[in-house]
Image (tube, helix red, strand yellow):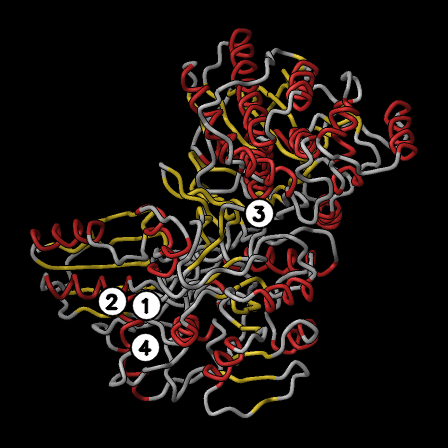
Amino acid sequence: MERIRITVKGVVQGVGFRPFVFRLAQEGGLSGSVRNTSGSVDIEVEGAADKVAEFRRDLVAKLPPLASITDLMVATVPVTGETGFLILESRAQAGQFQLVSPDIATCADCRRELFDPADRRFGYPFTNCTNCGPRFTIIRDIPYDRPLTTMRPFPMCPECQAEYGNPLDRRFHAQPNACPVCGPKLTLLAPTGERLEAPDPLLAAAAALLSGSIVALKGLGGFHLACDATRDAPVELLRRRKGRGGKPFALMMPDLETVRRFCFVSEAEAEVMQSPACPIVLLRRTTGGGAVELAGGIAPGLSRLGVMLPYTPLHHLLMAQVARPLVMTSANLSEEPIVTDNADGVARLHAIADLMLVHDREILTRCDDSVVIVDDKGMVPVRRARGLAPYPIRLARPVRSVLACGGEEKSTFCLTRDREAFVSQHIGDLENAETLAHFEATAELFRRLFRVAPELLACDMHPEYLSTKYARELAERSALPLVEVQHHHAHIASCLADNDADGPVIGVAFDGTGYGTDGTIWGGEFLVVDPSSFERVAWLEPVRLPGGAASIRRPWRMAVSHLLKVPLWKEAFARRGVVPATDRELQVLVQQISSGLNSPMTSSAGRLFDAASAALGICLEVRYEAQAAIELEEAALRADPADERSYAVEGRCGPIELGTLWGALVQDILSEVSTETIALRFHRSVADLVASTCAAVRANTGLSRVALSGGVFQNRLLTGLVVPRLSALGFEVLRHRRVPCNDGGLSLGQAVIADALRR
């Protein structure tokens, strides 16, 4: 006989781990107990030595689908002779924390019950079990027990309580467990907030969608705005009411078969779409959907669509009724956080939605939908949120407790403790008080859930970022040391942490804007980086940003700035029909660039792509972030790939001159080469520049690893050209896999750098 004590850490609460342990013990005829604590799951088992050994093996080998183990400690303890195996009450422990599961898409068992007329949960839009349902968005504190969730106001009926208390039931200790008798309920509201009587609110909402109405739908982490994606009128109405500009809408489709009517879906993409995270996946669209087409205003001019499958019972029921694609976009006004509260929904959405389908379960934490792409090596996050957060990024080594406040766009924060880096869900752009309040509230929740008392603060160097101001004020109040981190250093350090790698490494940081150590705007940087230091060894030759942000909104101004020294640039503009201003306005702009008046210097790669897009007449004024670069990539994708030419541009250490690139591009315009071909040649030229510059840096440093980071590398064409060029030169290439390459990953890099600098 043998008795052992096992302490397990990881995602092992709220995912069916204790009933799994119970079943393993029963199968082996073992006695003992299992208990949740604030920091772990504690197990004791006693029995025949061979059965105890088998239990230890199966505990790791046969985990429930949503569970994961990060640490497992085993100790031999005295045999007690007890009989039976018990699931003990949870125990709170001061200072300890337990990993919290993200919200999980509806599992196959719950889907079957949902559409089974004989099941007591038939048609119930809030069904769940230990394998699926809300987690992160409803939890107030740990241990993860019902009284510490927003399900507390819903006492279970006898049948639900029996399931909850039965270790052999898949709803054993499923904290959101409920049914039509005792659980949350749907209500239909008018835009004014008036309650509308309907025998079935969900059927009424489905009918409204089919009639062309816009419906605000309360989901897991906030509200969505939904409309029929196959009709032009409701899509254009939603775009106008929401102030969406030309930014593409996300779609929800009933099933994978429907998705395949409108998009090409690889096996890997299908697997990600149907995974427990169920994110929005960016898919290449087909030329037609058959008898039914999507509205033209869904993603104007774009070859990719953002598509997700239903991930809650409410979505499954709604999509079964409408049986067609729906726009399913975050319910907020431009630049504001997603709506979560019923009353707030009425206040903020009454001018957008014709109808509101709400429920009475509180959403404690906002959480947008995750957005990913899938490549030959798996999933790459573009926006990390529902289904992925708050899973931590496991670090290669322990770090101090740091609160890193991220950047301004695509804001996230990062809290570290030991080897765990808790990168928050996507917060949004920190440009207003509402988003900052969301940032602060979520940071407080993370500190409480994961028992982190920061010893150190980190932020971006940019003095005007709200995240920087927040960090400075917090440092002053708390007397904690603050480390201000250069933007592109943080990008590359984030990529290193994402890959469990140390420096030094050649870091290529290409983005739109980052505050440089010389006070100018960086964004086309080649750095030599390790977590504690960086050196800027090469960069795109800086040009003027005339009017500052005005040039970001009107990329033709950047085209003038880049082309000003190129002969015949005006003729090239005219040949492509680029007439954005009168001769007098152009003259004033040229004078502004020449004098430097309100025209800071920038080495931004993002602005380089903007300039090329405008020079080709593709996008002269943007209505959403990165529109000019996105449309330039789209043009390049339409080109004949057999044309393998590029514009001669040689990378080097120091400032990289782009005059030869622009001269060749202008000559192609004047020679009537197609816009698509020039766009492809431009992408190839930038890829050549990256490869040759890295080779020049290697010649000086001997480094043979390259880390790619920054939002420009969301350009799949560019990245697909850069990586093989670098690999052919013998470089090992590191790319983001767990956090976005855009500013959503900055906070992770800041945290790692701050820890390294303060050691």
Q: In front: mark 1 or mark 4?
A: 4
Ranked by sequence position, the earlier of labels 4 and 2 is: 2
Q: Is residue 12 left or right of residue 202?
A: left
Residue type beneath disc 1: Thr
Q: Position of residue 312 (x, y in %)?
A: 41, 69
Ranked by sequence position, the earlier of labels 1 and 3 is: 1
Q: In front: mark 3 or mark 4?
A: 3
Q: Report the residue marked by disc 2.
A: 19
Could you tell me if the residues under marks 1 and 2 are in contact, i.e. CB atoms within 8 Å?
A: yes
Q: Position of residue 127 (x, y in %)?
A: 37, 76
Q: Report the residue marked by disc 4.
A: 114
Ranked by sequence position, the earlier of labels 3 and 4 is: 4
Q: Report the residue marked by disc 1.
A: 130
CA gap, disc 3 and disc 4? 38 Å
SS at mark 1 in the image: loop
| Crowd tier of the residue under label 2, counting other residues whose Cα lies within 10 Å: few below 14, some 14–19, many 20 or above | many
In front of the other: 177 or 285:
285
Q: Is residue 151 left or right of residue 163?
A: right
Residue type beneath disc 3: Gly
CA gap, disc 4 and disc 2? 23 Å
Residue type beneath disc 2: Pro
SS at mark 3 in the image: loop
